[in-house]
Amino acid sequence: MSGVVCIDASLFLAWLLAEKHDKAALNLLSNWSRDGLELVSAPLFHAEVTSVLRNKVYFRKLPIEQAENAFLLYQQFDISCKISDLEIQKKAWKLAKALDLPRAYDKQYLAVAELEGCELWTSDKRLYNSCYGKNKRIRWIGEIST
């Protein structure tokens, strides 16, 4: 594995909110931190994290205090993207075509992984299934044991 790993919002939210597979996700985070891996993501990552937290509060699935704490913790993480948005969109478009998928939206994460030459880790089973057997970069948190 390279010194970089791409994550999507679902995996990050598993860390923040103790969601399904949270122990495996936390173990990954600990290992990556120990190994000094750089965390990268697609630009939509930040909008998704913020939106999901707010959505959970609005629909009373998460107490406001917990969401505020999660949002503060999120702001402390250095998760960046050094690739231009247009380059990501072009790659996501190509990936969606190659994978014969109707949407390129979440393929932006896979595009970043492709362009960075690293793995994409997700907690999103639907995203994983859409690429399973077709792209070797995508990894699902459910495939590792805690």
Image: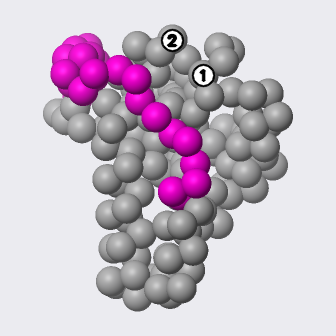
Q: Would residue 77 be counted in the magenta stretch?
A: yes
Q: Which residue is drawn at 50% across and 76% down?
A: 67
> Type of residue at label 2?
Gly
Q: Is residue 142 above or below residue 35?
A: below
Secondary structure under the numbered disc 1 in the rendered image: strand
Q: List x then y, in percent, for residue 131.
A: 41, 27
Count residues near mark 1 (Cα–Cα under 10 Å), then give few for <14, some for 14-19, many for 20+. some
> Type of residue at label 1?
Val
Residue behind mark 2: 117
133 and 7: which is toward the camera:
7
Name the side, left or right, on which 8 lies relative to 130. Answer: right
Q: In which quarter of the image is the N terminus?
A: top right
Task: Residue 128: tell me if it is visible.
Answer: no
How far apart are labels 2 and 1 at the CA level?
8 Å
Count residues near mark 2 (Cα–Cα under 10 Å), then give few for <14, some for 14-19, many for 20+. some
Q: List x then y, in percent, for residue 87.
A: 24, 17
Name the side, left or right, on which 32 lies relative to 87. Answer: right
30 and 146: which is toward the camera:
30
Q: In this view, does 75 lie above or below 117?
A: below
Q: Which residue is drawn at 40% across and 88% down?
A: 60
Q: Give the range drawn in magenta.
A: 74-101
Residue 4: which disc? 1
Secondary structure under the numbered disc 2 in the rendered image: loop
Residue 3's image quarter? Answer: top right
* Magenta span dominant secondary structure: helix
Q: List x then y, in percent, for residue 9.
A: 45, 49
Q: Would residue 52 be counted in the magenta stretch?
A: no
Q: Which residue is drawn at 50% across and 77% down?
A: 68
Q: List x then y, in percent, for residue 84.
A: 28, 21
Q: Residue at x 63, y 42 (%)?
A: 141
Q: Do the residues labelled 2 and 1 touch (CB within 8 Å)?
A: yes
